[in-house]
Image (cartoon, helix red, strand yellow):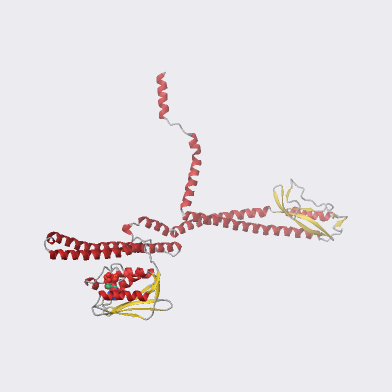
Amino acid sequence: MDKSTNSDRNTNTTKKPVNIRKIVFFPVYMVIFMYQWIREKIQYSIRLTLSFRYIGILLITMFGAGLAVILLFGGIRIHAAVQQNQAGIQEILHRDLVAPPLTDGELNGELYALIQDYCQENNVLLYADDPQLKIDLTMDHGFREYGSKSAYGIALNGQHIYFSMQKNFSVGSNAVKMVIYTDIQDELWTLRSLAAIMGMVYLVFLFLALIAIGLSGKGIFQPIKDMTRTVRDISEQNLNLRINVSGSKNELKELALTFNEMMNRLEDQYNRQKQFVSDASHELRTPIAVIQGYADMLDRWGKNDTEVLQESVTAIRNEAVNMQELIDKLLFLARHDNSTLEFLKEEFSLTELLQEIVRETEIIDKGHKIALDIHQEISVHADRARLKQAFRIFLDNALKYTPVNGEITVKAQKDSAWTEVSFKDNGIGMTQEELRRIFDRFYRSDQSRTKATGGYGLGLSIAKIIILGHNGKIKVRSKAGEGSEFIILL
Ligand code: ADP
């Protein structure tokens, strides 16, 4: 007894119970799942959303056009049939008979018979809106009327559908209002066939339109797919990746082109930044190496040899000054790049500032002739210290790149629109190729690189930032071997 219950239990646990609820609701779950899947796809796919919209518009337009055609066609045919019946009946009512058409308000019996024949032949029912006339051919099998005896209406009589219309007929000298019920069964059949043919043609065209929409969408949205793939693949190592922009021009291609242009700018900026960091570290490595060299020399011989000691201290001090100068310039550029550079503008005399700069320069530099060509008092609204820094750069360059005994002219003049300051020298000048690059950070021409006077190639970059920060312009005129002129417009 016990054994059998055990084995029963075993078979129960191995066999899984059939879940009838799951089987019954499976199709419902499937429909819900499909609905959600399509909804999600439409939500996240512009192509599908647009396709569905186009199809919707297409369906509504096609349905509207079809309905309009059927209604117009049906209306014209039914109207023609009613007109024909009206003419037919009127023609009978006007026939010349021996007896008058109406006697004491009643219709001539012969006339009534003729009308009855006509109505039978043409499937027409007639009703006169006059109790004396007693024309009522509507009393048939279960006559039902919608819009009773009004100007227009619909009536059913057995299997037939009638279109009713109220008309005035002249009987003898009287005008009698009658309702003509025209059988429109044939017209409705014709319209049904027309609707079926149109429906089939629409289905074929809808299918073709679906294929066309599907195919056309593919090409249009290709740039978006390319863009997504490219953006996903872009990293620091392959900033040169671009979107393929072949094919016809449209808004998406415009977007792809704009994206590529943005990438060009970013890549350019990134490369410049990289170059800047590498140039800056390179420039800092040299003075550090020099300081290290002299420190080693001091360590070995400087303790006893006062000459070595003095030389090393001087060299270390000079290199420290150079480093300080370089770091100041780098800090200036970094502040500009971080947009934390500020100009404290005030009204001051530009004439005085240029006189001051020339005076200070003349004290240090005795090898050049500096002419100051200013014939008016010019005042400007600017950051005095920054402007002095920029003018110093132009003047120092003029001194650096002009051989001893050369001439430098500092000129300033003002018109209604601009204040013009120029630094002109008759020094080594520049080639066209050099001119294009002098405002690049760390750029130095080969000639100035070999010269001891050469700086770090940051001066003009700084001067440019200062002048542009004052909404000014810099023009350069230069010819190799003949000299240069830097014109600053403020
Ligand atoms: P640097 O510190 O080397 O002078 P700048 O940025 O001031 O750096 O100048 C960049 C380069 O432009 C110089 O190395 C030099 O070749 C050229 N340059 C600037 N001013 C003059 C000038 N007045 N005459 C000739 N070359 C000049």
Residue 279 x/y as whole percent? 27, 64
Residue 296 x/y as whole percent? 15, 60
Q: Is residue 64 visible?
A: yes
Report ligand 1 position as a quadrant.
Answer: bottom left
Task: State whether residue 210 is above or below residue 286.
Answer: above
Q: Nearer the viewer, residue 345 or 417?
A: 345
Image label count: 0
Residue 89 relative to residue 444: left or right: right
Look at 46% across and 52% down and name the residue there: 44
Q: Is residue 400 visible?
A: no
Residue 17 x/y as whole percent? 45, 31
Q: Quadrant of the N terminus?
A: top left
Task: State whether residue 335 is above or below residue 423.
Answer: above
Q: Residue furthest top?
A: 1
Residue 161 relative to residue 233: left or right: right
Look at 40% across and 56% down and name the residue there: 228
Instruction: Specify the quadrant of the image occupied by residue 347.
Output: bottom left
Q: Quadrant of the C terminus?
A: bottom left
Residue 111 x/y as whole percent? 82, 56
Q: Nearer the viewer, residue 237 or 336?
A: 336
Q: Nearer the viewer, residue 228 or 468?
A: 468
Residue 346 relative to residue 98: left or right: left
Residue 443 relative to residue 37: left or right: left
Task: State whether residue 180 is above or below residue 472.
Answer: above
Task: State whether residue 238 is above or below residue 454.
Answer: above
